[in-house]
Image: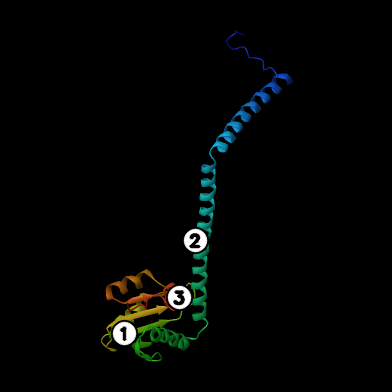
Amino acid sequence: MSARYRRRRWHRPTCGSFLLAVAIGAAGVWVVVRAVVAWLTGHPAAVAAVVALAALGGTGISRLTGRATARRVQRADAVREYLDLDPAAFEAAVADLCWRDGCRDVQVVGGAGDLAADVLATTPDGRTILIQCKRYAAGRSVSSPDVQRVGGTYQIVHGAQLAIVVTTGTYTADARAYARQAGIRLVDGDGLAEWARGGRPPWT
């Protein structure tokens, strides 16, 4: 076999050489640590600033997370309270929100043959509004045909100037698209919770 392809022998390192390598590595680490400690000792203001920023950052994140969680719990609790009502009581509760926010001539007119009107009222600025109430379980969506029935009656049959659909659930994409075209306001479960907590009423 030629010298070119002869295998090289692997020599096991001796204990002494191994300990020497460990000692050199430890010495290098110690030098770096001493340099960092010396810099920190000479710059106490920088250390204090870093600590303060870290504390403020942690506090800010904690507060933001806490507020977001509290808002989710409040929305969930508000929607759950409305889901505990029967449909007639839910209509009355929506009518109460109208009264609270300054409407007058508030009437609960829902029932058989209501022609898509559950609540009629006059807003503080004098407009007649029609509200259709849909007490739906979580995860259920109001469909486009439901919103279309409101669009077909609120002006011609009830003489209202604005139509609003309020639900404890959500709306399908088609329902939202039709509502935008017809100028109908949609209030989903989250929007209802905001309104109940004193947020802007849907006719504003």
Mark 1 element type = loop
* Residue at (50, 57) in percent of width and height: 60
Whole-angstrom CA distance, mark 1 to mark 3, is 21 Å
Residue 124 got which mark?
1
In front of the other: 167 or 34:
34
Quarter occupied by the C terminus: bottom left
Q: Position of residue 76 (x, y in %)?
A: 51, 73
Compared to residue 77, the image places residue 159 above or below, namely below
Identify residue type, mark 1.
Pro
Question: What is the crowding at mark 1: few (fewer than 14 residues within 10 Å), some, or many (at least 20)?
Answer: some
Label 1 vs 3, first from the N-terminus? 1
Whole-angstrom CA distance, mark 1 to mark 2, is 36 Å
Label 1 vs 2, first from the N-terminus? 2
Question: What is the crowding at mark 2: few (fewer than 14 residues within 10 Å), some, or many (at least 20)?
Answer: few
Identify residue type, mark 3.
Ala
Query: Residue 17 vs residue 129: left or right?
Result: right
In front of the other: 64 or 3:
64
Identify residue type, mark 2.
Leu
Query: Residue 88 vs residue 200: left or right?
Result: right
Quarter occupied by the N terminus: top right
Compared to residue 23, the image places residue 147 above or below, namely below
**Labelled pair 1, 3 in contact (Cβ < 8 Å):** no
* Residue at (28, 76) in percent of width and height: 183
Residue 82 got which mark?
none
Residue 64 got which mark?
2
Can residue 106 be seen by looking at this rendering? Answer: yes
Residue identifier under label 3: 193
**Labelled pair 2, 3 in contact (Cβ < 8 Å):** no
